[in-house]
Image (cartoon, grey):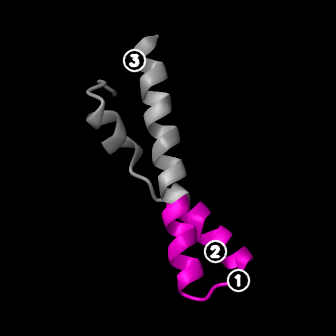
Amino acid sequence: MNTELELAETIRQACIEAAKEGFMHASMSGLCAEGAMEAAISAIQSLDVEQLIDKKGIKHG
């Protein structure tokens, strides 16, 4: 169970970082708040979840 919680926390942190970076880059590019939010969501959607799982050393099928 502890490993599952660690994985969940890793994924949560990766989502937060992706959203922050996506929003920041979009805002700096001149997008409005709505466009920047869409870019942040897109950044989360493009995360490689399998890579995050592999990083934590959890076997998956």
**CA neighbours of label 2 inside 10 A, class few (<14), some (14 to 19), many (20+):** many
- Disc 2 target residue: 36
Circles 3 and 1 in contact, beta carbons < 8 Å: no
Residue segment shown in magenta = 20-43
Task: Please report the residue visible at 43 percent of the width from the left and 24 percent of the height from the top.
Answer: 6
Give the residue type at disc 3: Thr
Circles 1 and 2 in contact, beta carbons < 8 Å: yes
Q: Residue furthest top?
A: 1
Task: Please report the residue visible at 49 percent of the width from the left and 65 percent of the height from the top.
Answer: 21
Q: Classify mark 1: helix, strand or loop.
A: loop
**CA neighbours of label 1 inside 10 A, class few (<14), some (14 to 19), many (20+):** few
In the picture, which quadrant includes the C terminus? top left
Q: Main secondary structure of the magenta part?
A: helix
Task: Please report the residue visible at 49 percent of the width from the left and 31 percent of the height from the top.
Answer: 9
Residue 33 in picture, x, y percent from top left = 72, 76
Residue 1 in picture, x, y percent from top left = 46, 10
Of callouts 3 and 2, the N-terminal one: 3
Q: CA distance from mark 1 to mark 2?
A: 6 Å
Q: CA distance from mark 3 to mark 2?
A: 33 Å
Give the residue type at disc 1: Cys
Task: Please report the residue visible at 58 percent of the width from the left and 69 percent of the height from the top.
Answer: 23
- Disc 3 target residue: 3
- Disc 1 target residue: 32
Q: Classify mark 3: helix, strand or loop.
A: helix
Q: Residue furthest right?
A: 34
Q: Is residue 60 left or right of residue 45?
A: left
